[in-house]
Amino acid sequence: MNEEEPGAEIPPYAERVLEAAELIPAGRVMTYGDVAEFVGEGGPRQVGRVMALYGGAVPWWRVIRADGRLLPGHELRALEQYRVEGTPLRHAGADHMPRVDLRQARWDGRSG
């Protein structure tokens, strides 16, 4: 996850996406599509782009792919956070990396 450049203005849509990411409780997740629906604009790709460009300052590991796979290139950092927060995980797949258990970990944006 990249940090935004000092002094660079973040677009309003990106601000809303980052604010949504900050609302997700520890141990819970939202998919990119969930976040887009939550903010009422864009789609999974737009949310993914925002997280790639500006997500380093928020709990980026709580915004995930719809299949529960860990973010490529950041798997170990995300896994460390999931274990600290107690995020429900499923057993490792063919790639030997666990996945987030979306049935248990998915946050609907309404309750803590």
Image: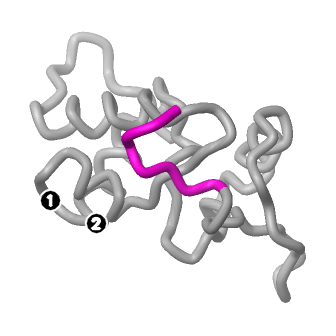
Does 8 sit above or below residue 22? above
**Label 2: element kind:** helix
Number of numbered discs overlaid on the protein picture:
2
Residue 10 position, x and y percent, is 18, 27
**Label 1: element kind:** loop
Residue 15 position, x and y percent, is 21, 29
Q: For the view shown, which residue lies furthest in the bottom direction?
A: 94
Numbered circle sitting on residue 42: 1
Q: Residue at x 52, y 58 (%)?
A: 64
Does 86 sit above or below residue 92? above
For residue 46, what is the image quadrant? Answer: bottom left
Q: As drawn, is 57 to the left or to the right of 102?
A: left
- Look at mark 2 in the image and give the residue it sits on: 45
* Residue type highlighted by circle 1: Gly
Query: Is mark 1 in CB contact (under 8 Å) with mark 2?
Result: yes
Whether residue 46 is in magenta: the answer is no
Name the front one of labels 1 and 2. Answer: 1
Which residue range is magenta in the image?
105-112
Does 112 sit above or below residue 51? above
State whether the magenta stretch is mostly helix, strand or loop.
Answer: loop
* Residue type highlighted by circle 2: Arg
Check disc 2: other Cα within 10 Å, few if <14, some if 14-19, many if 20+: few
Q: As drawn, is 57 to the left or to the right of 95?
A: left
For the residues labelled 1 and 2, the Cα–Cα distance comes to 8 Å
Q: Nearer the viewer, residue 53 or 101?
A: 101
Residue 45 position, x and y percent, is 28, 66
Does 62 sit above or below residue 103? above
Q: Residue at x 73, y 56 (%)?
A: 75
